[in-house]
Amino acid sequence: MNSPFPAKPRIAIVGAGALGTYYGALLAKSGHDVHFLARTGRAALLARGIRIKTPSARIHVRKVQAYGATEEIGPCDLVIVALKATANDQLRRLLPPLLHENTVVLTLQNGLGVEEPVAEVVGAARTAGAICYIGATRTAPGVVECLFPGLMAIGEFGRAKDERTQAIVALFNRAGVKCEAHDNLEEQRWRKLVWNVPFNGIAIAAGGITTDLIMADEGLRALARRLMEEIVDAAAKFGHVIPRSFVELQFERTAKIGRYRPSSLIDCEEGREVEIEEIWGEPVRRAKSVGAAVPRLEMLYWLIRHKLAARKPAKRRR
């Protein structure tokens, strides 16, 4: 296979939160030329590097290329968007300085409708998406604890996988990330919602509880299952077949990670914006548009909206 990337591609990581730091560190550790946009915590990255802790390894990237603006990074071969989807209004400013004629932009964001804002800026032909099945938390700038390394599913926006998709997958696999290419990116996004909708949502709506408490409570665990079933049924209306065994797999994986604070709960409790529309609102709207009944999902959506509206004004990362 002829790779669309040079032997040592220039890679930009836009956003140095948990996912951007984790995947960027693994790519850098494997020898790639990685450049981080870190508008907060940049001094810590430059001074102390990046430290990753997983159940089986400790990784330290001592020399980190971190910048305060994308103009300082310049054109790259692969741009990885690791910002929260709530920051997508910044893409028109952040992405253009990173582009050359053949740049590919890969978004790691959660939820439905996250490729569209990228495609509006860089064009659909340049746009790809990744769904990250991972349990990772940034505990400090440049410090990430990963309880569940999981896997990554990558697909092209609006079209089947091709040589470019396989080349991106190969980059991650060589870096130690279990990664697969898929023909149907939208189906993979619905699959990720099977976990994100109940566990992120119940964690917030139930007053800030961790996944182990959800798993241990008979009523909350049953609610999580019913929410998963609503997502599976809604996805089926769009032709996306998600087997019931996939639901069981989510419970098995969640039991293994123990006490875990989902990312949306962390954002909620720390006063940051939560990806409420991408994870709960858009699935509700799409489900209702095809006549799928999602009463629990819709109730959860409104409960979370109420919870967030009652908070102090969100802190904006700059």
Image (cartoon, grey):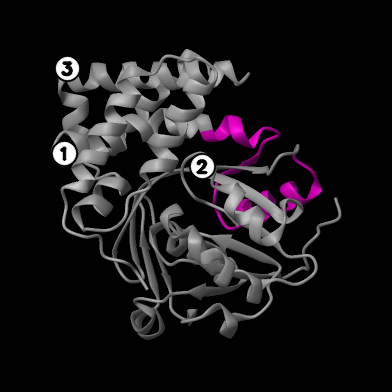
Label 1 sits on what residue type?
Ile
The magenta span reads 161-189
| Residue at 47% in and 19% down | 232
Residue placed farthest to the right in the image? 2
Residue 260: give x, y in percent of width and height: 25, 43
Query: Where, by quadrant of the figure, is residue 172 drawn?
Result: bottom right
- Distance from label 1 to label 2 (Cα)? 25 Å
Q: Tell me the crowding category of disc 1: few under 14, some 14 to 19, or many 20 or more residues within 10 angstroms, Cα based.
A: some
In magenta stretch: residue 309: no
Residue pointed to by mark 3: 218
Query: Where, by quadrant of the figure, is residue 318 drawn?
Result: bottom left
- Helix, strand, or loop for circle 2? strand
Mark found first going from the N terminus, 2 or 3: 2
Mark found first going from the N terminus, 1 or 2: 2
Q: Is residue 315 above or below residue 311?
A: below
Residue 74: give x, y in percent of width and height: 64, 80
Residue pointed to by mark 2: 151
Q: Is residue 45 left or right of residue 76?
A: left
Mark found first going from the N terminus, 3 or 1: 1
| Residue at 28% in and 25% down | 299
Q: Is residue 149 above or below residue 171?
A: above
| Residue at 69% in and 76% down | 75
Q: Tell me the crowding category of disc 2: few under 14, some 14 to 19, or many 20 or more residues within 10 angstroms, Cα based.
A: some
Residue 221 seen in this snapshot: yes
Label 2 sits on what residue type?
Leu
Residues 29 and 294: in front is 294
In magenta stretch: residue 172: yes
- Helix, strand, or loop for circle 3? helix
- Helix, strand, or loop for circle 1? loop
Residue pointed to by mark 1: 209
Label 3 sits on what residue type?
Glu
